[in-house]
Image (cartoon, rainbow, N blue to C red):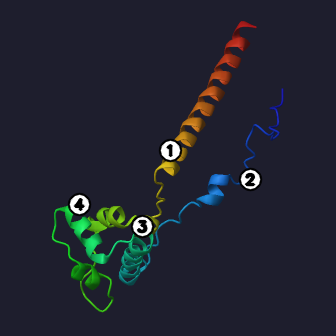
Amino acid sequence: MAPRRRIPTPTTADDRQSSLFDRLYPLPEPPRTSAGALGCAARICGLVSHALDYARTEGGLTRAMVAARMAELTGERITEATLNAMTAESHELRFPLQWLAALVEATGCTDPLVFVAQQVGALVLIGQEALDARLGQVQRQVALLKREEARIKQQMEGRHG
């Protein structure tokens, strides 16, 4: 007997179509490995500055307030002057990765984190997005197990029939 051709219905996925998730959250590209491809000092300076501006416009927080919160979160000495120096491309001082989580928490801006993740081909999902993605994984696993169950039952019927 020839295998049945799978015809997409409203309840089955059509593999030829991209999902809504793929359109909203395109898969990140693999990291670039050519010489200098990951040099991003100027971009990081800009993103830290953007996060500080976001904290001011969205949360009414000054750079001094963000620095104080980051210092509290990290237990390290972080001042407004330090943040100012780190956002100026002309300074040699660079923003340390160990402060990234504190910057995101203090400013509410995830853009620097998203940028770093994209550089290595990763995707950042936060809060409800992460739960939605995990639910999708579980649903795919359930569907695979149901197909396996049906295959086993079919084999069992073939032996008893």
Placement of 41 over or under 73, stated as above or below: below
| Nearer the camera: disc 2 or disc 3 | 3
Residue type highlighted by circle 2: Gln
Q: Nearer the viewer, residue 24 or 6?
A: 24
Disc 1 versus disc 4: nearer the observer: 4
Q: Name the residue under label 1.
A: 131
Q: Which of marks 4 and 2 is nearer the N terminus?
A: 2
Disc 4, SS: helix
User: Label 4 is placed on what type of residue?
Assistant: Leu
User: Could you give the CA–CA distance between mark 2 and mark 3, rounded to whole angstroms?
Assistant: 33 Å
Mark 1 and mark 4: Cα distance apart in space: 26 Å
Task: Give residue 109's mark.
Answer: 3
Q: In this view, does 111 lie above or below 20?
A: below
Image position of 156 (left or right of 5): left
To which residue does mark 2 refer? 17
What percent of the width, then of the height, locates residue 139? 59, 36
Question: Is residue 34 shown to the viewer in this render?
Answer: yes
Disc 3 crowd, CA 10 A, few/some/many (<14, 14-19, 20+): many
